[in-house]
Amino acid sequence: MNINLNKNDIIEILSDKSTKLFESADKIRKEFKGDYVHLRALVEFTNICKCNCLYCGLRRDNKKVDRYRLKEKQIIDCAKLSAQYGYKTIVLQGGEDEYYSADKIASVIKEIKKFNLAITLSIGERPYDEYKLFKTIGADRYLLRIETTDKELYKKMHPMASFENRLNCLYNLKSLGYEVGTGCLVGLPEQSLESLANDILFFKELDADMVGIGPFIPHPNTPLKNASSDNFDLALRVMATVRLLMPDINIPATSAMETLKPNGRIIALQSGANVIMPNMTDTIYRKKYEIYPGKICINDSPNMCVNCIKSKIESINRKVSVSKGFRYDKE
Ligand code: SAM
Ligand code: SF4
Ligand code: FES
C-alpha cells in the first residue's frame, strides 16, 4: 500500500473530527510493523542548555531550573542497568551542553556498545565531524526534531538559531547512515494546519526513519506560558497522518501525549504508533528535567516504569519487542 497525499488532502484530514483516521493508521501499523512495541530507555543526562527555545522549560534564560549533569560513569551505569532490564536501545538525551565534548560522548558510546545496546543520541546540533565520529564509534540513531518547517515561526521560537543549520544537521545525519528521527511540536502559537501539513510532507521528503510528534505544553517559566495547551487531539491526528504516508517507519507514542490525556500513550499506540520511550533517568533527576509541566513518571523509578509499561502494552494485546527495532530489520 502506498498512500500519496498532497498538502490539501492533509489539511482536510487534519480538519476532520472523525475517528476513521485513527482506525486506518492502526490498520497500517499492524500490516507494516506488526504487534510488537519497541521500548527505548530514555536517559536525561543533562538539563544544561545553551539554547533559548521559547517553548522549553530548560531554556537558558529560565533561572528557576536546578541544573545537573551526569558523570560519564553514571551514564554508563545507567546503560548497563537498561540492558539488564531487557532494553535493546538506549536514548541519551540532553540540553545542548558544551561540557560533553565530542571525545567525552565518543568514550561513553564506546563503553555502552559493550552492553549490546543500540544507541540513540538526542543532543542537538553538532558539527558534521562530531556526528561522523559518533557514528564511527557505534551510535546507531539520532533524534533531532525540526520542530516546525515554517521558517518565520522557527525564527520566532528560536531567536538565536538558524533553521538552515538544523536542516543541514538532519541531512548530514542521513548521509552518515544514521537512522534519523525527527518530528514537530503541535500547537505552537500561530502555527497553522498548512504549516503542519508542510511538516508532514517534509518528514516524507527527508525519508525520516522515525517521527515523533509532541503536543506543545506551555511551561510557566517561559515566554509562551499563556499559550493554549489543548493540543492532544491535533497532535494525535498529525501522528496518525504520518503513519498513513510513511507506513514502515517507527513512530513513538510520546510522553507529552500522556501528560495531556490519561492513557495518552496507549491511545497513540492504537492510532498508529509502535514505539515507547520509558524513562530510565534516576528518580532524583526527573523533576529537574522539566521541559514542560506535568511530566509523567517524575516520582517513579526506572524499575517501576519498565514494569508499568510492559503491563500496559500487554493489556491491549500487543507484545514487547525483543529486537533492536530498526526501521529495516537488521536482525
Ligand atoms: N536539546 C535537544 C533538542 O532540542 O533536540 C534534545 C532535548 S529537547 C528537551 C527534546 C524535545 O523536547 C524537543 O525536540 C522539543 O520538541 C521537546 N519540547 C521542548 N519543550 C517542550 C514543550 N513545552 N512541550 C512539548 N515538548 C517540548
Ligand atoms: Fe535546549 Fe532542546 Fe530545550 Fe531547546 S528544546 S532549550 S535545545 S533542551
Ligand atoms: Fe513510568 Fe508508568 S511508565 S510509571
Image (cartoon, rainbow, N blue to C red):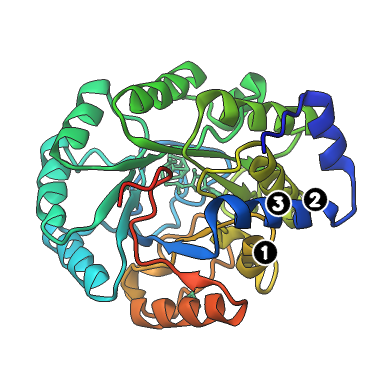
Q: Would residue 13 appear left or right of 115 to someone viewing this image?
A: right
**Label 3 is placed on what type of residue?**
Ala
Mark 2 and mark 3: span between their CA atoms? 6 Å
Q: Work out whether residue 195 or residue 48 is closer to the camera in this orientation and state it.
A: 195
Q: Element at badge 3?
A: helix
To which residue does mark 3 refer? 25
To which residue does mark 1 refer? 270
Residue 247 percent across, percent down from the top left: 60, 43
The residue at 25%/30% (across/down) is 131
Please identify the quarter of the rendering in which residue 322 is found.
bottom left
Residue 91 percent across, percent down from the top left: 33, 54
In the image, is the residue at mark 1 within 8 Å of ligand 3 by its beta carbon? no
Say whether disc 1 or disc 2 marks the residue closer to the N-terminus: 2
| Crowding near the residue tagged with mark 1, few <14, some 14–19, many ≥20 C-alpha atoms within 10 Å | many
The numbered dot on residue 21 is 2
**Label 1 is placed on what type of residue?**
Gln
Residue 19 percent across, percent down from the top left: 85, 57
Q: Element at badge 1?
A: loop
Q: Element at badge 2?
A: helix
Mark 1 and mark 2: span between their CA atoms? 11 Å
The answer to whether any part of residue 295 appears in the image is: yes
The residue at 37%/80% (across/down) is 301
The answer to whether any part of residue 45 appears in the image is: no
The residue at 47%/49% (across/down) is 62
Mark 3 and mark 1: span between their CA atoms? 8 Å
Residue 125 percent across, percent down from the top left: 36, 30
